[in-house]
Amino acid sequence: MLVLRLALAAIGLVSTIAFASPNDPRNGAEFVTLPQKQDVKAPAGKVEVLEFFMYHCPYCHQLEPELAAWVKKQGNAISFRRVHVPYTGAADPEAHLFLTLEAMGKGEAMFPRIEHAVHVEHIRLAKDDAIIDWVGKNGIDRNQFLETWNSFGVMTAMKRLPRTISDYRLDGSPSLVVNGRYVTSPAQAGSRSVDQTVEAANKAVITVLDVLVAKAQAENAAR
């Protein structure tokens, strides 16, 4: 009887592992579907992929190599954008930095430099003065930066950020949203995996993204 129980337990474990593959993600497990689709800004024919991140987030930093390679591989199939989560609320300094650089058209160009400063050089960009001092030393015109930093457009975008996070029902970073509807993250994608390492979770979320992008493409084509 004991042998039979052990055999049945082993079969159950194999079955669980088989169904835990990110190649076949389940709604409510490896991803969730928002009850209300959010507005999509992607050009016609492309699937929008948003990464909700924070400059200081170590898990966002660890995901970046995998995510950057995946985005490059997608080519013209997707429209990829980052959105900075306002960690401390509507006046979050890091989010303010992100939105200012975006408004200046320098967001993506400065992204790797900021990542290196925060995660390799361990420079804290958590206060306005520290940020303004840092950008002035890293190739950004200080006066132009301050003008944009204090602009109506950036301040309005700052006020909207908390509502955006609420609309997408996000509870952590990094989080990824496909076509305004499907939300996943390394934590979700790897939640049922036997391998619970960060590396495995990052690979799992890339696999889930492939599935969700294909799903969104099929839905777009059916319209």
Image (cartoon, rainbow, N blue to C red):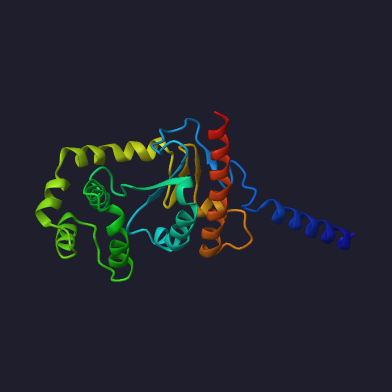
Residue 7, image x and y in percent? 84, 60
Direction right: furthest residue: 1
> In front: 75, or 97?
75
Q: Write the residue at 87% across / 63% down.
A: 3
Direction left: furthest residue: 143
> In front: 185, or 11?
185
Residue 39, image x and y in percent? 40, 33
Screen quadrant of the C terminus: top right
Figure check: 147 above or below 43: below
> In front: 159, or 178?
178
Direction top: furthest residue: 223
**Which image quadrant is residue 152 in?**
top left
Q: How many marks?
A: 0
Q: Write the residue at 11% across / 56% down.
A: 142
> In front: 58, or 141?
141
Residue 67, image x and y in percent? 46, 57
